[in-house]
Image: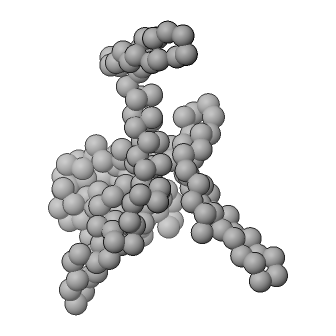
Amino acid sequence: MSRTRTRTYQTRDRMTKKTVPVAEQVSKQSSDFARLFHSSMIDTEMLARPTIDSETREESALKYVGIWGSLSVNINAAPRHVLEAAFAFGGDAKDIAEGIIQRRRIEPFKDIDDLTSSLFRYAVSIRDCEKYITTTSSFFTIRVSATSGVAKASAVIAVVNDGEKLQRIAVVSG
């Protein structure tokens, strides 16, 4: 059963109540988070500095932050550090991330059961983290770079696909 929440909106002439499904609330919150995270109000340089620095690893706070505010990590697309963060609660994070990366080079995972059967040695750890992972995405980034003579421009556009249409979340120019 899907939960809903009643929200009150003010229009020019009157107050309006609207029932908002949970999925729409989650999408709105994710979009708002993405806009905030990519605004000039956040010092991403500070977040990118290593907080754990050892002979074998340099880790920054960005390792633990979902870039676009997604609720789960797409194991078919996430980089190593994001996979490790997603499996940190189940243990064996480095080994699971490596296994995922090696397998998805050959073929993407169809679902979480496919992951569990492929990495059956880590099945318990995978099940412990199941609510944090997925094999599909609704958030995507588009990177655009252009060069004309000596002028260069680039941008990253984040979009969310709600199944019916693409909605722009943020545009970061570089």
Residue at screen point 29% across, 67% down: 61
In the picture, measured across the screen, residue 154 lies left or right of residue 77, that is: right
In the picture, measured across the screen, residue 151 lies left or right of residue 60, that is: right
Q: Position of residue 145 (x, y in %)?
A: 69, 69
Residues 39 and 95: in front is 39
Instruction: State which quadrant residue 168 falls in.
Output: top right
In the picture, measured across the screen, residue 73 lies left or right of residue 54, that is: right
Q: Position of residue 147 (x, y in %)?
A: 76, 75
Quadrant containing the C terminus is bottom right
Instruction: State which quadrant residue 3 falls in.
Output: top left
Q: Residue furthest bottom?
A: 55
Residue at screen point 61% across, 63% down: 173
Q: Is residue 35 above or below residue 148?
A: above
Residue at screen point 82% across, 82% down: 149
Residue at screen point 17% across, 61% down: 91
Residues 168 and 138: in front is 168
Is residue 171 in view? yes
- Total marks shown come to 0
